[in-house]
Image: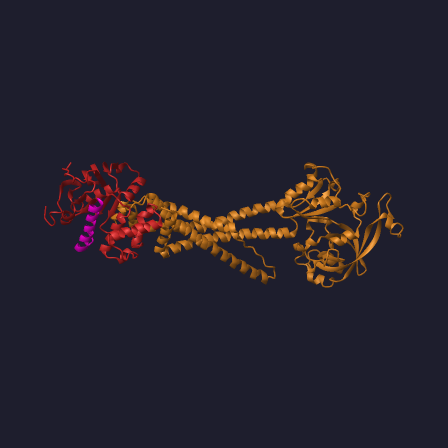
Amino acid sequence: MKIPDLTELALRNLRESLLRNSLTTVGISVGVASLVAMLSLGIGLQQMASRRLVKSGLFDTIIVSSRREMRGMDRQEERSGPIFGESRILDEAARQEIERLANVTEAYPDIRFATELRFEDKPHLTMVSALPSSARGNDAFEGMQGSFFSSDSAPEVLLQKSFAEELLGKTPPLGAPEPDVAELAKPLLGKELVMRFAQRAPAASTAGEGPDNADVAGASYSVVSREQKLKIVGVSDLDPESMRGPTRAKVFLPLGLAEKLHVMLPTDLREISHPADQPVYSSISVRVKNPAKIQAAEDAIKKMGFTTFSIADASRGLRQFFGVLYAFLGIFGSLALIVASIGIVNTLVMAILERRREIGIMKAIGASDGDVRSLFFAEAGAMGVLGGILGVVLGWAIGQAINFGTNVYLRRQSLPPENFWAVPWWLVAFAIGFALAVSLVSGLYPAGRAAKLDPVQALRYE
Amino acid sequence: MASVPEAPAAVSTVAIRSENLCRHYRMGENVIRAVDGVSLEVLSGEFLALLGSSGSGKSSILNLIAGLDRPTSGSVFVHGRDLARLSREELAKYRLHVVGMVFQSFNLIPSMTVTENVELPLRFAEVDRGRRQTLAREALERVGLSARIHHRPSELSGGEQQRAALARALINRPQLLLADEPTGNLDSRTGVEIMDMVRELNRELGMTIVMVTHERALAERYARRMVFLADGKLIDDHLSYPAQSVGRAT
């Protein structure tokens, strides 16, 4: 029989026992819905996790430093790992070269120095670091009080919570509950800090300017003591530099401003012959398009002769975790579909008993075993496809409902809403295809039985 | 082998030939010999009636000729082909193209309309929809059924149902028409109408007809030859002369 004829006859037969076949189809759709619901939950959770990770800036960042910088630190991987190319100076030219690499979105210098900050005439010594304007999206600033820098060169400053505590003299004793950021921020926002720092100035222009000038023999620049007034615009609860360990900063400046200030950095002493307007960086932060591309970018930078560091390995473990999660969710989701497939077998076996005579008639007037088998297959397949489509819709609706419910809950807990539900098109295709496959497998036995029916026996029944 | 009557001059080829045909069923300990060593030759264009009481094996022989059943031993040749040697697939093709069948209980599919029932064999033959509808209309016109062809069989009278079944049997232009008690469920007037139609097919189209019946009068009136069976064995085989002897006992 031709496919359109088969489809037509199959749908006609399904309509004949409408209630029974509808119930079976609903059974399949519930199975498909549970599969879709489970898998889209898994996919959604993974997407949420990787969104979070990308935002955290940990998984798409590579820290690049000059190989010399690492010398003497005796790091394990430096001794055992392969050495690519020649070691190079990490200057502006190198930064631009790295920025041009494939998959790299930006490469900015890490400007980081210990200095003295005066607040209400009291000096505080701390680590200061510069942030590029792209750090605005970093979720370390999600719960921040106040606002991000108004521009990349604004004389503004962000404080980490613990430094805010220090400024207010409110450092809690160990084990005591941490004070609220909002409370800490209130008296500080809009206030002024004065930063004292050492500036590298071109030798010619700074000669004989005052007692602060410290001429270094043979250097192409001099060092000048400067002060810069900064406005506190934000206090952050989280630590955007958790990866830095002990050298992490507690005070943040806009990158543009920090570059303009030409702060004397520890590394400047080493590259003393370098002109002042071509700074040498101690390290560069490189942001990659997405965490999956990090390894390729890292290898490329290593080849240029630099040392790199990233947390890419951790994300690899995460992918493995989601692989296992998918498998589990998939297995639980398909259990209902397996139960539904038993329903198909049952329905079709019943149909054979009921339509025994009809099968006999079809064979008597010339239907082959194959025709009868195809017809039952088509009926099973039609139930599978219909159930699959219905199931995807149902699964999607369940997902939306759970997502909505959870977000209502999150809002009540005053947490930001999350979309942890995703039904990508391939899941829709997979679910319908899987339902079809399961129903065809269920149709194997009934179709074979119908095909082998003896027409003489079948016609004898009245 | 029983005496084979002289064939009319117009028809000379052998349509059906059985040799020592046997069909035995096992019922627990007992073996039922439904067909037990029947040798028979039916010429092309013949109108033959198989007569006998119920259980005489006449329907079993019909099923063997129809290719619905396979002999336990012996053979049936239809137009030279040994049905016992055909595969299941080939038997289905044979039933589709060579044989048309009519039954006592009409055997129309209740969920389909009359037209759909009639064109069903064409679906198995993979004929296009347009051609199917033309052929179905022609077949229905031939059996005089042009009203209510879009109704379901249950909405039709017995006579109309049997006409529809006859149209379905004719749709693939078979060489052989096998009828199993075709008037058994009809009143005598409708039965006559159906039988007139069958005789017309035999005379006008030269179709070979084998009809199973237990009504001797019907056989004498329409068939040209009568074969009598009892306990699966052929007991008598002779010509009747329907043209001259309508209603006359043989």
User: Colour in which chain B is shown?
Assistant: red
Q: Main secondary structure of the magenta part?
A: helix
Q: Quadrant of the N terminus of chain B?
A: top left
Q: Position of residue A13 (x, y in %)?
A: 35, 53
How many tags in the picture?
0
Magenta stretch: residue B107 in it?
Answer: no
Q: Which stretch appears magenta?
A: B182-206
Q: Position of residue A109 (x, y in %)?
A: 73, 48
Magenta stretch: residue B187 in it?
Answer: yes
Q: Nearer the viewer, residue A256 or A26?
A: A256
> In the figure, is residue A26 to the left or right of A271?
left
User: Colour in which chain A is shown?
Assistant: orange
> In the figure, is residue B167 to the left or right of A38?
left
Q: Is residue A450 visible?
A: no
Q: Nearer the viewer, residue B72 or B205?
A: B205
Q: Is residue A135 visible?
A: yes
Q: State how the image is colored.
A: by chain
Which residue is depicted at the point 24% across and 48% down?
B102
> In the figure, is residue B130 to the left or right of A263?
left
Q: Position of residue A339 (x, y in %)?
A: 42, 50
Quadrant of residue B189 within the rendered picture: bottom left
Q: Position of residue B74 (x, y in %)?
A: 22, 36
Quadrant of residue A454 within the rendered picture: top left
Q: Quadrant of the C terminus of chain B?
A: top left
Residue sitting at the far left: B249
> In the figure, is residue A281 to the left or right of A6?
right
